[in-house]
Image (cartoon, rainbow, N blue to C red):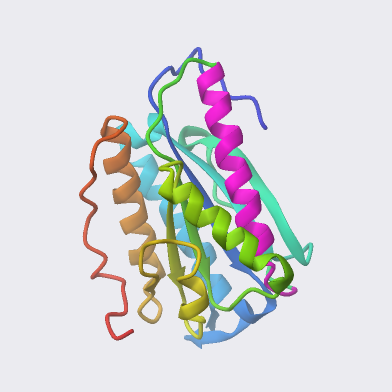
Amino acid sequence: MAAIDYSGNPNQRTPCVLVLDASASMTEEVGGGKTKMDELNMGVAELEKALRDDDVALSRVQLAIVSVGGASYDADVMMDWTDVVNFSAFHIEPGGNTPLGKGLKIALDLVEEGKENLKANGISYTRPWIIVISDGEPTDIDEWDKVVQDCLAAEAEKKVEIFSIGVQDANMQMLGQFTSKPPLKVNGLKFKELFIWLSSSLSAASRSRPGDKLQLTSTDPWRDVGI
């Protein structure tokens, strides 16, 4: 993983992996000439802006990004662990299928690697998050069942919190299999509101102490309550 200068910032960290669907289906237009991928890219830029406006989150939140599909037509780490102060949103090109099982496995591995790195540097941390945003269903079904069990076990053992978020045309039944929490669905084009909620929630987590019970802000501004 990329080197992070903990000597200059020994603050507690809140790690979060974004698993973003960049498959070809994300090129579907959703209104105003914009595609789902356009909206997702704008949402990530909004996340950067919102986190940078929060002094506590700026020094405490760590992000990593995994793309599912995209230019490589595979699941890949697009950004290894990075403190928000050094995070710059970048454009993700869509393409290929949806190897979501592999993307989830990569995210689980990133979480464990990140925790080990924090421990090695004497840095405390709150429970890591994995945020999955997808419009489809996994195409790597051969490894899906094992990854689902690994995700559920990691949650049960309090190693990670997993949030599953579907966008237009998503198979919500599949997206609800790998987390103990009900999947949420974005209402139309409310990606900006989604990422503002994520920033606010990460900010709240970064202010908490390890083991604290969090009260997250309401998902109503962006959630489709009709599913």
Q: Residue at x 51, y 42 (%)?
A: 63
**Outermost residue toward the right in this view:** 72
Q: Is residue 63 above or below residue 125?
A: below
Q: Is residue 169 above or below residue 4?
A: below
Q: Quadrant of the C terminus?
A: bottom left
Residue 155 in picture, x, y percent from top left: 44, 50
127, 216: nearer the viewer: 127
Residue 109 in picture, x, y percent from top left: 63, 43
Residue 27 in picture, x, y percent from top left: 63, 80
Say if residue 48 shows up in the picture: no
Say if residue 176 shows up in the picture: yes
Q: Which residues are magenta?
A: 96-120
Q: Residue at x 67, y 32 (%)?
A: 1
Residue 223 as seen in the image, left or right of residue 63: left
**Outermost residue toward the top in this view:** 7
Q: Is residue 113 magenta?
A: yes
The chief SS type of the magenta part is helix
Q: Residue at x 49, y 72 (%)?
A: 175
Residue 198 in picture, x, y percent from top left: 36, 54
Q: Is residue 98 magenta?
A: yes
125, 59: nearer the viewer: 125
Q: Residue at x 40, y 29 (%)?
A: 125
Q: Is residue 66 above or below residue 168?
A: above
Residue 16 as seen in the image, left or right of residue 150: left
